[in-house]
Image (cartoon, rainbow, N blue to C red):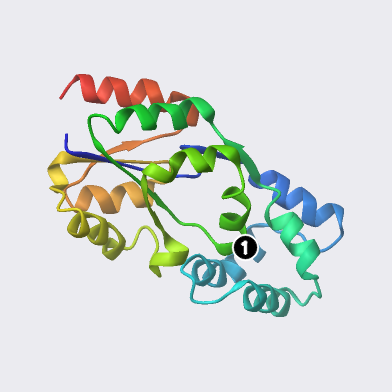
Amino acid sequence: MQAIIFDLGEVLYRLDEKKLVECFAKKSLTEINAFYYKKIENQIHNYEKGIIETAEFIRKVNNILNKKISKEEFSECWNALLKGFIQENVEFILKLQHKYNIFIMSNINSLHYEHIKKEKLFGKLKTIKMYLSHFEKMRKPEPEFFYKILNENHLIPSKTLFIDDNYQNIKTAMNLGIKTILLENPYLLIKKVKKYLSQK
C-alpha cells in the first residue's frame, strides 16, 4: 500500500446532526427535517465547494425556508453538530505517516472549518496534506476530487486506500480502482485499518 486517504467527519472527527436539528428547533428558528434538507441541499453543496460564502449561504437558506435567522444564531446551530476530534484516531494516523503517504479528504464548509481549526488536535495534523472541498472547489463523490489527489501526488489507485463513512464516496473511489473501507463506526477505525493492512 502506497497511500491512505482518510475522511474527516465520522472517521477522525465526531459529528452529531441531532444537535444541529435540536438547536434550530429549540430556538424556534426552523425544523430541519428531510423535506427542508432536500430544499437546501444544493446550497449546502455549493457552500462546501466554496462557490458561495457564509453570508450568501445564510441568505439563500433564509430565502428558501422563508426565515430571518441571524448570522450569530445560524452559526451557533450550524456548528452544534461538531463534537471534536477522536484523539486515538488522530494519533494513529500520525504514526502511519512513518510508513505511508497520509492524506485527509473532506467535504467541509467555511463555518465548520473555522471552528475545527481552533481545536488543539487540528494543530497536530499540520504535517498531513489536506484536501478540503471549500478550498478545492470540488466535493466528494465527484471523481475529479479523487483524480486531483491521485495526480498531484503520483498515486497508483490500486495501491491507495480510501476510508469514508459514506457509501456514495466509497462507490466513486472503487470505480476509480482505489481500495476502500466503509467505516460505520469511527471507534473501529484503528482495528479495521490494522486488519486490512495486515492482509496486504
Residue 95 screen position, x and y as percent: 35, 27
- Depth check, front residue: 31 or 82: 82
- Depth check, front residue: 14 or 117: 117
Which secondary structure, mark 1?
A: helix
Residue 170 screen position, x and y as percent: 32, 46
To which residue does mark 1 refer? 37
Above or below residue 60? Residue 102 is above
Above or below residue 11? Residue 173 is below
Above or below residue 24? Residue 61 is below
Q: Residue at image x 43%, y 62%?
A: 133
Above or below residue 125? Residue 75 is below
Amino acid type at mark 1: Tyr
Q: Quadrant of the N terminus?
A: top left
Residue 59 screen position, x and y as percent: 69, 78
Q: Residue at image x 44%, y 41%?
A: 125
Residue 51 visible: yes
Say left or right for 89 vs 60. left
Say left or right for 30 vs 86. right
Say left or right for 29 vs 177. right
Q: Quadrant of the C terminus?
A: top left
Label 1 crowding class (10 Å Cα cut-off): few <14, some 14-19, many 20+?
some
Residue 66 screen position, x and y as percent: 77, 77
Say left or right for 170 vs 57. left
